[in-house]
Image: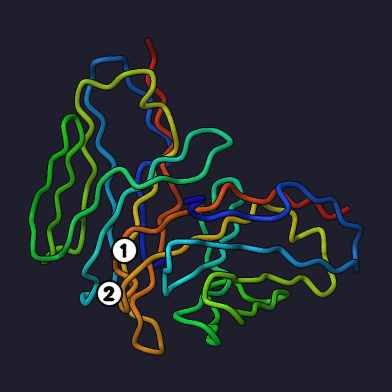
Amino acid sequence: NAGVTQTPKFRVLKTGQSMTLLCAQDMNHEYMYWYRQDPGMGLRLIHYSVGEGTTAKGEVPDGYNVSRLKKQNFLLGLESAAPSQTSVYFCASSSTSRGAYEQYFGPGTRLTVT
Amino acid sequence: GENVEQHPSTLSVQEGDSAVIKCTYSDSASNYFPWYKQELGKRPQLIIDIRSNVGEKKDQRIAVTLNKTAKHFSLHITETQPEDSAVYFCAASIRASGGSYIPTFGRGTSLIVHP
């Protein structure tokens, strides 16, 4: 049981390049989330999903897109990276239909955009 | 204003002292209030949580209290140890537009325990 995994762990992009971050969970959780963490700003929600085939915008969705084609996977895409997207990205998942239970976080992806 | 406010942003204590971190939330329908600990370079991990039908919960040196009327909740750590040094995040389940309850985090408190 691996829990929540993220790929890749580190990435450096040039401005304007694109990339996809992959999150996978093996706990059969309905809810999945993408956060970014910047110093002093806490964990800010980018997008989330309440089930396979559904996605919704969080607090800071601009510049990002997501897809949840399979229940166990949640992809975060950056179409045209900007230096402001330099951050640590965490994926998380949780069970229950109301998202009101413990979140399990992945190890994070450190992204630098130059 | 922010949906979840957390104070203080930094807390420095001596080993053995108590530490208290406070959070307020805006959505009166919030029903779940977790606390996460994040050590340097690691992922956040749940340390304790409380639901809206409970006023207090304890787990060894850690306790959480909830005041639904005032819409605030607090984390209490007694007999602090150097290994308690970390960033602590509170969260509250906030009602989203689709009817789901989505955790919203405070900005975090950096706790430093001096030996």
Give the residue pinned by disc 1. B92
Name the residue located 71 percent from the left edge and 47 percent from the top edge.
Answer: A9
Q: Quadrant of residue B19?
A: top left
Quarter in which the C terminus of chain B is drawn: top left
Q: Where residue A2 sits: x, y (%)? A: 51, 50
Name which residue lies at 60% across and 58% down.
A36
Which residue sits furthest front?
A: A1
x and y percentages locating residue B46 in the rendered image: 35, 47
Q: Measure the C-alpha gap from mark 2 to mark 1.
A: 9 Å
Secondary structure beneath label 2: loop
Q: Residues within 10 Å of mark 2 (few under 14, many from 20)?
A: some
Residue at 75% over, 60% down: A84
Q: Amino acid at mark 1?
A: Ala
Q: Where is residue B98 shown, x and y percent of the image?
A: 40, 89
Residue pointed to by mark 2 = B27
Q: For this rendering, which residue is in front, B69 or B100?
A: B100
Q: Chain of mark 1?
A: B
Say above or below: B50 vs A64: above
